[in-house]
Image (cartoon, rainbow, N blue to C red):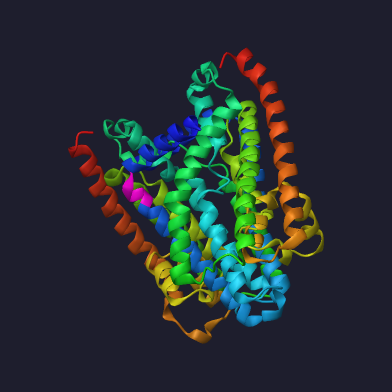
Amino acid sequence: MRIFWSFARQAFQNTAIYRFDYWLQLVSVFLMMYSVHWIWTSLYSQHPAAFGVNVAQMVTYGILGMALEAIFNPGQGPQTYIATQLKSGGIDTDLAKPLDFHLHMLARNVGEILFRFGTLVLPSALIGGAFLGLQLPASPVAAGLFAVSLLLGYLALFALNFLLGMVAVITLDIRSISWAYSSLVRFFSGQMVPLWLFPGFLGALANVLPFRSIYAIPISIYIGKLNGSAALEALIFQSVWVVALFIVGRLAWSGVHTRLVVQGG
Amino acid sequence: MEELRIYMKLIRISMRSRLQYRADFITGIISVLVLNAVNLGLIGILVHRFSQLHGWTIWDLVFLYSMFVLSHSLYSLLFWHFNMMDTYIAQGTFDQFLIRPISPLIQFLGREIQYIGIGDILVGVAAFSLAYSNKGLHWQAWQWLFFTVAILSGTMIEMSIRWMIASTAFWLGRSLSLANIMNRFNLLVQQYPIDIFGTWFQVVVTVIPISFLNYYPSLVLLGKANDGTWLRFLPPMVAIVSISAATLVWRAGIRRYASSGS
């Protein structure tokens, strides 16, 4: 736990230097919440029946999708750190640390994410609740399951990002790959458009891919679209993927590690 | 003209160094195709559900999207490097552009052209052709002219906005978050007709003139004149104003950077 805390403090110090930057990020989240609020209310007025949920749930889904962006942004994570370290050659100091690399990346990222959760997600959720119609969780049970699901979603995203970081070790530059990666993650995780609106084949595909662990499952539980045994099944789905992705991540790392050592860092 | 010659020369040098990373070029193009497929996919899903958005059919929306991408493609090919400026300033490497007797802007832009813009051009042309034929459009010469002018103006507008954002790094140290906000606006304006949003949003994307890349010219080209706003004829004027404003901000920024001795 101490490691996580020290990385959180470091994230705080990095951010505290650029205070103006922080306000801009908050403005950016507000902007996105405002626009999805409009998209959904305007579409809802066209075809109320096409949604499967009521307008308040739909708006809550959209706004939460934006508020969680600060911790669920697929463009920011261990892979950016790994890529930077590879380029600058600093990766050898990471390898020299008496700390498992996978755990080190997790600690570093958790610290940052905790910090972002406190400083960005919570304030934006409050703003969303006060001005844009973000509702409270569907029930106390839903709130509890949401918290668990959010954690699992975070771990799934971390594991996926870590794998992308492993790709960086091989290709050395992931700038362009990450664009495609981020947009696919955003798409299949249902950040903008909920997966239950996806037609036939796309919907089926989205349902088996791990990405729906990230936005779709936690938020669907939050608004009460997923409840009872369906919600529990979804949590199991998330857990299975998290375990599988962590195992793949470790295997990939041990493969890549030898390669790094051969390269001489 | 001398500056143009130097610019071309710099670009040739940077191209030669970039050509060593052939794989990066290919993954870059593929990434752009995926990115756009996803964006269009989201619109497709919504229209599949709702048959149209606020009176815009699927091909209207593809048209709107293609205009944005076409303008954006030229920007990203030639001017994307502005996004890197705050890194130069933070690391102190920007000084190299100030000590040579050539315009710092030319040297800076000559550093890199972004191949990936080619992917945007492919997407833009494909989306535009599909929309054009599926809407059964038959344009007169003046419409083609307006279209061309609007695309080029759009490129200049986005370039100016990015240039200004990059210049804020002279004061703020970094401009990444501002650039990210811009990406957000871009994506929304690119995908949705702005009349779907509230008035505030429409005002913002008109004052920060991104909606002139696609929304306003599309009103003219798709004959959606019913709301009769005169703004739709203005893209070239907006481009000129934007470039002038960006030039002023840039000059002030350089002066500040040079005098702080950092």
Residue B86, percent across and down?
Answer: 37, 41
At a point 66% along the width and 25% down the height, the residue shown is: A253
Any part of residue A175 in sight? yes
Any part of residue B210 in sight? no
- Start and end of the magenta stretch? A18-22
Quarter holding the N terminus of chain B is top left
Quarter holding the C terminus of chain B is top left
| Residue B4 vertical placement versus A221 (above, below) | above
Drawn side of residue A67 relative to residue B237, left or right: right
Residue A125, percent across and down?
Answer: 48, 61
| Residue A2 vertical placement versus A205 (above, below) | above
Disc tally is: 0
| Residue A102 vertical placement versus B59 (above, below) | above
In front here: B137 or B2? B137
Residue B248, percent across and down?
Answer: 26, 54
At a point 54% along the width and 66% down the height, the residue shown is: A136
Residue A20, percent across and down?
Answer: 32, 50
Q: Which residue lies furthest to the left in this view?
A: B259
In front here: A195 or B223? A195
Residue A171, magenta (yes or no): no
Drawn side of residue A145 relative to residue B86, left or right: right
